[in-house]
Image (cartoon, rainbow, N blue to C red):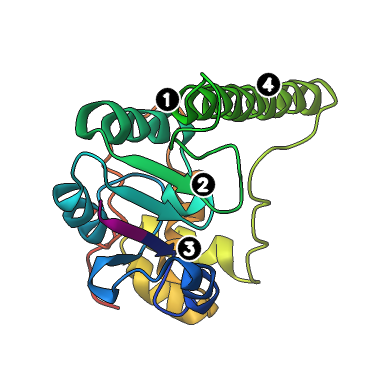
């Protein structure tokens, strides 16, 4: 039986010492410790993929906590089944004693107990995500009913904005030149310029934020 460990942090700025320290008692060779420096949103990680190719039947994979393996419990369940059922390796999660698929004393196996615990975790996590989405939807409906404006609050335009818009419409200056004169970004000016000059039902005008539109391409 070979022992392997998997370590993950979200970026190279984060420290892996705490996870390394937790593995000391297992005396795992450094070549058998795989580490990824990226998000746990999925399992498209180079070190994890190499680890899976190395794991064999009877081997043991150790992780500090279940969230080091991944963040999405549905994906974790799929990987857990692949490792324990397809590869026939064991998994031990240090921070959760019940998540240890090795055989226990008595008739029940660790795999059975671990699978049950992980299924409960996945259910709770999914239920919480749905609850959060439901509360967000209810909050949006309540805000609209109370007449509250949702989204970013429009930025107040500097003095001279309307005059600049009029000059742009006539082709006297470009939108970029108008933005420079007002001391704001071209993106901000152009968005507000469109709001006051383009009819709400006009869907034929492109939304490219530059000076290539009719009436805005003349040099100042």
How crowded is the residue under tag 3: few (<14 C-alpha within 10 Å), some, or many (20+)? Answer: many
Which of pointers 2 and 4 lies earlier in the amino acid sequence? 2
Q: Nearer the viewer, residue 3 or 107?
A: 107
- Mark 1–mark 4 CB contact (< 8 Å): no
Segment colored magenta: 1-5
Front disc: 4 or 3: 4
Asked if residue 106 lies in the magenta stretch, the reply is no
Q: Residue at x 30, y 45 (%)?
A: 43
Q: Is residue 174 left or right of residue 57?
A: right
Q: Visible in this render: residue 204? A: no
- Circle 4 is placed at which residue position? 134
Mark 1 vs mark 4, CA separation in Å: 32 Å
Q: Nearer the viewer, residue 59 or 9?
A: 59
Which of pointers 2 and 1 lies earlier in the amino acid sequence? 2
The location of residue 143, given as percent across then percent down, is 79, 28
How crowded is the residue under tag 1: few (<14 C-alpha within 10 Å), some, or many (20+)? Answer: few
Q: Which mark is residue 189?
A: 3
Predominant SS of the magenta segment: strand
Mark 4 vs mark 3, CA separation in Å: 36 Å
The location of residue 69, given as percent across then percent down, is 42, 49
Front disc: 3 or 2: 2
Q: Residue at x 25, y 33 (%)?
A: 88
Q: Which mark is residue 201?
A: 1
- Mark 2–mark 1 CB contact (< 8 Å): no
- Circle 2 is placed at which residue position? 66
Mark 2 vs mark 1, CA separation in Å: 51 Å
Q: Secondary structure at mark 2?
A: helix
């Amino acid at each position: 039986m070979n022992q392997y460990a998997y370590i993950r942090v979200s970026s190279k700025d984060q420290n892996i010492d705490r996870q390394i320290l937790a593995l000391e008692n297992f005396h795992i060779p450094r070549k058998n410790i795989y580490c990824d420096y990226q998000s746990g949103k999925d399992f498209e990680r180079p070190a994890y993929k190499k680890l899976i190719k190395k794991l064999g039947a009877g081997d043991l994979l150790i992780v500090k906590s279940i969230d080091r393996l991944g963040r999405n419990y549905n994906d974790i369940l799929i990987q857990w089944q692949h490792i324990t059922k397809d590869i026939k390796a064991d998994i031990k999660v240090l921070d959760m004693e019940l998540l240890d698929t090795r055989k226990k004393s008595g008739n029940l196996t660790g795999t059975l107990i671990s699978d049950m615990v992980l299924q409960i975790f996945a259910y709770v996590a999914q239920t919480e995500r749905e609850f959060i989405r439901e509360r967000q939807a209810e909050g949006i409906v309540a805000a609209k009913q109370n007449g509250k404006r949702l989204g970013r609050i429009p930025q107040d335009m500097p003095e001279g904005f309307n005059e600049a818009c009029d000059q742009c419409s006539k082709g006297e200056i470009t939108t970029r030149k108008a933005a420079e004169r007002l001391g704001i970004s071209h993106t901000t000016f152009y968005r507000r310029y469109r709001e006051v000059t383009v009819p709400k039902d006009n869907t034929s005008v492109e939304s490219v934020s530059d000076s290539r539109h009719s009436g805005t391409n003349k040099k100042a």
